[in-house]
Image (cartoon, rainbow, N blue to C red):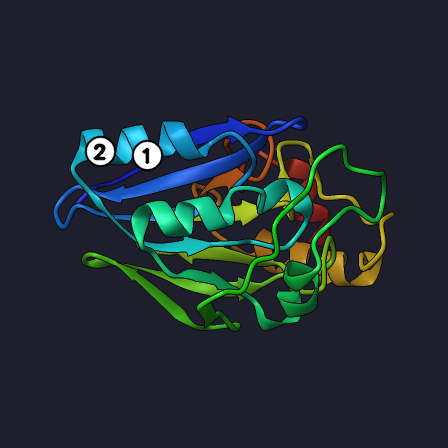
Amino acid sequence: MALTVETFAGGPIDTNAYLVFDDDSKQILIIDAPLDVDEPLANRVSELGGEVVLVVLTHAHWDHIGTTNTLHNEFSAPVAAHPLQESRLAEPGSSVMPLPFEIQAVYPDRWLHEGDRVPLGAHEFVVMHLPGHDPGHIALYSEPDRLLLSGDVLFPNGHGRIDIPGASESDMAASLTRLAALPGDVVVYPGHGLPTTIGAEPWLQGFKG
């Protein structure tokens, strides 16, 4: 009952989308939808012969949602996000810089809250609401699989920006405190950059309660 996680980086700031594949059921989760990943994702789904059952948006920043509607249409898969993202998804854009392209509005089919369960075949992810970088930021965690899809909360050697509108240093500290309590062998798949583990980030232990 193995899970396979594959990375598809896209867009002008190399944002990661993830394809999470359950070998037994052939079910697939897609995490985040940056620009330019739709074609490679479609090709890979076809190669695997899998079914995309859900597209999960960790948060509504423009670099994570650019191809959401394309993936929704391509795979006939529902889109899920935290309800605090509703207004930003309906009017996407950047509060930091002007964008030379348009990001389409996204209207999720499902809202995910803290503690909700996201099944994938015989596996199951728990939704963690982890604000700080963004008020409605979520991550997906599977304790049995030692796997965390962290979005922009946790990166190798650091965390997501807290100097942008909607960010909060105190909320980020609380979210990192929760992550610091996870087992050290949990593999973290971040919104940007390479995977890491909880134990490979010694700075994170400074947040441990």
The relative height of residue 152 versus residue 53 in the rendered view (above or below) is above
Q: What is the tally of numbered marks visible in this picture?
A: 2
Is residue 126 in view from this perspective?
yes
Residue under label 2: 46
Q: Are marks 2 and 1 in contact (CB under 8 Å)?
A: yes
Relative image position of residue 205 (x, y in whole percent): 66, 46
What residue is at 27 percent from the left and 42 percent from the top?
21
Give the quarter of the image for residue 170.
Answer: bottom right
The relative height of residue 204 versus residue 110 in the rendered view (above or below) is above
In the depicted view, which residue is nearer to us: 35 or 104?
Answer: 104
What residue is at 74 percent from the left and 49 percent from the top?
93
User: Identity of the amino acid at label 2?
Assistant: Ser
What residue is at 60 percent from the left and 60 percent from the top?
178
Left or right? Give the position of 189 relative to 40: right
Relative image position of residue 163 (x, y in whole percent): 87, 47
Left or right? Give the position of 200 relative to 172: left
How packed is label 2: few (under 14 Cα within 10 Å), some, or many (20 or more)? few
- Give the residue at the far left of this rendering: 24
In the depicted view, which residue is nearer to us: 156 or 117?
Answer: 117
In the depicted view, which residue is nearer to us: 123 or 197?
Answer: 123
What residue is at 53 percent from the left and 34 percent from the top?
16
The relative height of residue 115 versus residue 207 in the rendered view (above or below) is below
Q: Which mark is residue 143?
A: none
Q: In whole angstroms, how far apart are the C-alphas of marks 2 and 1?
A: 6 Å
Relative image position of residue 71 (x, y in whole percent): 41, 45
How packed is label 1: few (under 14 Cα within 10 Å), some, or many (20 or more)? some
Tell me the SS state at disc 2: helix
User: Identity of the amino acid at label 1?
Assistant: Ala
Residue under label 1: 42
Relative image position of residue 48 (x, y in whole percent): 19, 33
Tell me the SS state at disc 1: helix
